[in-house]
Image (tube, grey):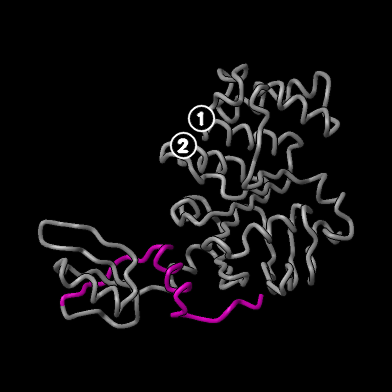
Amino acid sequence: MILRTDHLGKRYKGNVWGLKNFSAAIDTGILGLLGPNGAGKSTLMKILATVTRPTEGSANWDGYDVAGSPENIRRSLGYLPQDFGVYPNLNAVEYLSYLAAARGISGKSGKRRINQLLELVNLGEARKRRLGSLSGGMKQRVGIAQALLNDPQLLIVDEPTAGLDPEERIRFRNLLSELSGNRIVILSSHIVSDIEAVATSIAIMNKGHLLTYSTPEELLRSVQNKVWEITISSIELPEIKRTHLVSNTIRTVDGVRARVVGEQEPNNTARRAVPTIEDAYLLLLNGKQGEPHEG
């Protein structure tokens, strides 16, 4: 089960490219799409979910072209878009029953599936509450439930943790990990820690381009011996930020502990630090390493 994209691109009005030359072979597990706003993540996901058509290139699912034969991928697809909306006056059971019927899932099998999904997303006790009264995290779990109604082989979720509190974000990430065992999950986020926590492969994007597509281990190796920690005064911090790539700062009683990413040590007190995905991400986005990935 592999989803392949070949030089996929999308051009909008004004000759603006939302996605350009995206090539990848996506296998079972969680692919984390990482990049700032406007990186092209949502455009890619909309193409794969058959919401929009590519301007150039192709995507292939199970031997079929996604744009040419969208019904083939739709049978295997679960999709939670970034702007997921609910009917506030319906409860979870009513809402999921409506969507299940629209997808040809009805009767006893439909009721059984809805009950299973509500338990899976930990909404069994809230099944009869109006959707408008649910928290953001609970609504997102309803969104995941609707995306799983047809037990999809391909699950696409776009910025699912945006606006959630830390506890809800952790619950949501754990749920995606549980779901990824026998399907492809494509998870988009600009929050590095969400991707770092669950992804089995990572695609870093910026301005519509794919910068790298690799495993977390490969990304970490790319910044091995390029991450430093220094302790400086608050007065020195602006100059360090001007001359170096600073990924994080922590205030301590001894001053500011700054995390610096780069080839050369920032000063003679610097010591090497264990790299993180965020370090690799920032280095790529700041053009310190490599060119757009050509797949």
> In the rendered view, does 86 fall on the left or right side of 211?
right
Quarter of the rendering containing residue 148: top right
Mark 2 sits on what residue?
A: 168
Quarter of the rendering containing residue 272: bottom left
> In the rendered view, does 77 fall on the left or right side of 133?
right
Residue at (66% x, 43% y) in the render: 80
Instruction: Look at discs 2 and 1 and give the one toward the viewer.
Output: 1
- Magenta span: 269-295
144 or 16, which lies in front? 16
Q: Earlier in the sequence, mark 2 or mark 1?
A: 1
Label 1 packing within 10 angstroms: few (<14), some (14-19), many (20+): few
Q: Amino acid at mark 2?
A: Glu
Quarter of the rendering containing residue 109: top right
Q: Is residue 10 visible?
A: no
Mark 1 sits on what residue?
A: 135
The span from disc 2 to disc 1 (Cα, nearest Å) is 10 Å
Q: Are marks 2 and 1 in contact (CB under 8 Å)?
A: yes
On the image, the x and y values in percent for residue 265 come to: 26, 80
Determine whether 183 is above or below 248 in the image: above
Q: Secondary structure at mark 2?
A: helix
Residue 29 tag number: none
